[in-house]
Image: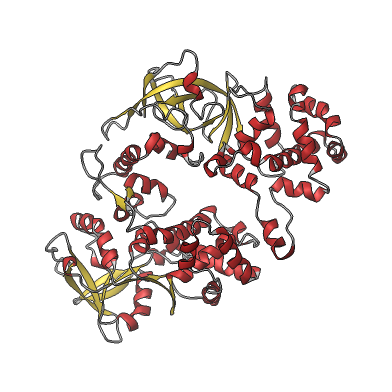
């Protein structure tokens, strides 16, 4: 093996594999200089089984052989299958394959070659993606993808106003549910779309094609499939899938766009990219960062040393270095919003304390601590789930109790209770689209409010009849409903006008049911599609509240924080930050030392109002 892998002459030399023109899979390794612009093809594939059901240990072991330069080289089953299929078309041509062309046992070479992978994929004549053996359903799925009339060129010509041509192309296909399912399963059933390494491989490639068995498809065809799958809400296919697989499909659709503008835009910091693609999978946890090295900026004027690929570092050291790059790269301390679940949308729309110069001190990587300039606001006294599905009976009562006990929420604005409710539900999330939630979403909110209270009344009184009575005469049910929930009646009465208008939008029980799940009636060719798609308020509420918690502070302020927020946590403004943050003080620590919990939406503090408080004070805090 040592003779097969002789030392490479320089940092810009690589090895390529050449398949022999014979019936067996024999090959030879050759060293080439990238500076001489050699011709070669890159193979992109998964080291384990290509499909999620390929869980047999046989897929994970290097138990197949390849004869190279007279030496027997152990390779994986999936790679061997790919070479068997490619032998006829690529025999005699140079191929770059990571598992074969890099000496995986030599640490310094592995570091250098991984750092060179951007050039390797950018200079390749083409990239072939191996998706595994074909099945009849997958072959049909590939054919059906090409029925989608919108092309990549047409998409970018229409960008950013792409929704109508996208939707029109989808509706025109008139796919059956079975055809939708086949396309969705093709895109979510293959591990290639989930792997971190495949990301830069297809973003950097000049020309890329997908091979499934003996069927070859261009990138545009697979992209069309991802567009179809994203709109295929009329099927039940997504219901049986891991949510992360849907995310990988949407991510693939987005990164195809990155290919078109990658060369013209500056690279993102490696800290930003490591977070952006953190759901991607890798066998070695360090590759969660190293896997985006080739598409990332790895130097920063605020950090002395460049980010280097070094597999001798621990996982914690690699992640900490990437986090440091993210902290200095994001404006307004936005990097902190990416610890845990990112939920507040576009942070630049908020200005909690961003008009002040951000100031923080980044300790050494080993200390793993940062000093911020902070202004304490208040402490959390109660929390509840910020999102619940229809028929989760305690969701609405818990929400009402948190917001209305012992009094209406504190706010610096002269606004009614319905406005506070609506803005809190979506965390003012539509402002980044130029939409004021208080004006543009009022009807949707009023229907949502009535439908939820209808469901709540039925649950707490145990009588369908009482809920129907509430539907026909909301005012008559406010007092008993408030009594059942333990809420001051006059507070619930503040919502009566909104509740009554919501009741008038519902002419049938079916309307109420659709209101609970955030859907609308459709008509004609779009009826099934419309009833499968939730309206804007429902989508934004789920995005904002899923895996998050509402909280109330001792002074009556209300907000949304991470799912880990607890009673006793402290809400603070950080100098220069767009949003408030939540911290946790442990009894064993000094008073100014905290653990970081996460970002927050705090109603009445998102646009600089907190800077006008009487007696505001700023102090240094140390965060680990």
Task: In the displayed orientation, state which residue is furthest to the left.
Answer: 9
251 relative position to 27: left or right: right
Percent coordinates x, y for residue 58 in the rendering: 40, 67
Q: How many marks?
A: 0
- Estimate the x, y position of residue 117 in percent, counting from the top left: 27, 60
| Percent of width and height locating residue 27 | 24, 78
Above or below, 373 relative to 220: above
The one of 560 and 524 positioned closer to us in this rendering: 524
Q: Quadrant of residue 238?
A: bottom right
Q: Is residue 253 left or right of residue 545?
A: left
Residue depicted at x 45% and y 60%: 252
Give the camera-side residue of 216 and 449: 449
Q: Residue furthest bottom?
A: 22
Viewer-side residue, 81 vs 214: 214
Residue at x-position 46% and y-position 62%: 156
Q: Position of residue 56 (x, y in %)?
A: 45, 65
Could you tell me which quadrant the N terminus lies in? bottom left
Among the 4 quarters of the image, the one containing residue 545:
top right
**Do we see residue 131 in this rendering?**
no
């Amino acid at each position: 093996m040592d003779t097969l892998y002789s030392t490479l002459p320089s940092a810009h030399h690589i090895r390529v594999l050449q398949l022999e023109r014979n019936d067996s899979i024999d090959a030879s390794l050759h060293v080439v200089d990238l500076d001489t612009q050699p011709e070669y093809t890159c193979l992109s594939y998964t080291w384990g089984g290509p499909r999620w059901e390929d869980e047999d240990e046989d897929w994970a072991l290097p138990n197949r052989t390849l004869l190279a330069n007279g030496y027997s080289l152990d390779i994986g089953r999936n790679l061997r299958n790919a070479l068997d299929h490619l032998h006829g078309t690529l025999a005699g041509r140079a191929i770059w394959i990571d598992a074969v062309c890099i000496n995986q046992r030599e640490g310094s070479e592995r570091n250098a070659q991984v750092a060179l992978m951007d050039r390797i994929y950018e200079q390749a004549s083409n990239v072939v993606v191996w998706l595994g053996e074909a099945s009849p359903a997958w072959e049909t799925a590939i054919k059906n993808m090409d029925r989608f009339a919108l092309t990549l060129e047409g998409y970018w010509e229409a960008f950013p106003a792409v929704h109508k041509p996208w939707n029109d192309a989808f509706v025109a296909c008139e796919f059956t549910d079975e055809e939708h399912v086949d396309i969705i399963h093709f895109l979510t059933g293959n591990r290639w779309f989930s792997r971190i390494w495949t990301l830069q491989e297809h973003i950097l490639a000049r020309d890329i094609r997908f091979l499934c068995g003996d069927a070859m498809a261009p990138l545009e065809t697979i992209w069309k499939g991802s567009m179809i799958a994203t709109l295929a809400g009329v099927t039940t296919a997504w219901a049986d899938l891991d949510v992360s697989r849907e995310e990988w499909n949407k991510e693939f659709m987005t990164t195809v766009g990155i290919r078109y503008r990658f060369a013209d835009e500056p690279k993102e910091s490696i800290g930003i990219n490591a977070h952006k693609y953190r759901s991607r999978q890798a066998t070695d946890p360090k590759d969660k960062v190293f896997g985006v090295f080739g598409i990332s900026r790895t130097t920063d004027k605020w950090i002395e040393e460049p980010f280097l690929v070094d597999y001798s570092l621990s996982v914690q050291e690699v992640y900490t270095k990437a986090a440091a790059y993210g902290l200095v790269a994001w404006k307004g301390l936005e990097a902190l919003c990416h610890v845990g679940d990112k939920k507040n949308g576009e942070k630049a729309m908020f200005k909690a304390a961003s008009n002040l110069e951000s100031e923080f001190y980044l300790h050494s990587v080993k200390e793993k601590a940062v000093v911020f300039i902070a202004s304490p606001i208040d402490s959390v006294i109660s929390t509840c789930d910020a999102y619940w599905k229809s028929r989760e009976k305690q969701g609405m009562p818990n929400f009402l109790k948190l917001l209305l006990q012992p009094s209406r929420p504190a706010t610096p604005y002269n606004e009614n209770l319905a406005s506070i409710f609506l803005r809190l539900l979506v965390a003012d999330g539509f402002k980044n689209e130029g939409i004021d939630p208080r004006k543009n979403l009022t009807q949707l909110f009023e229907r949502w409010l009535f439908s939820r209270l209808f469901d709540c009344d039925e649950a707490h009184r145990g009588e369908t009849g009482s809920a129907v009575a509430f539907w026909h005469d909301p005012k008559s049910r406010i007092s008993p409903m408030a009594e059942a929930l333990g809420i001051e009646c006059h507070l619930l009465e503040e919502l009566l006008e909104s509740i009554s208008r919501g009741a008038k939008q519902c002419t049938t029980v079916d309307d109420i049911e659709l209101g609970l799940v955030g859907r609308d009636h459709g008509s004609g060719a779009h009826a099934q599609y419309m009833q499968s798609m939730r309206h804007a308020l429902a989508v934004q509420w789920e995005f904002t509240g899923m895996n998050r918690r509402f909280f109330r502070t001792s002074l009556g302020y209300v907000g949304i924080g991470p799912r880990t927020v607890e009673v006793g946590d402290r809400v603070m403004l950080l100098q220069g930050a767009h949003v408030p943050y939540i911290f946790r003080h442990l009894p064993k620590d000094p008073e100014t030392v905290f653990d970081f919990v996460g970002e927050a939406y705090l109603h009445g503090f998102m646009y600089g109002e907190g800077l006008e408080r009487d007696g505001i004070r700023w102090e240094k805090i140390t965060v680990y």
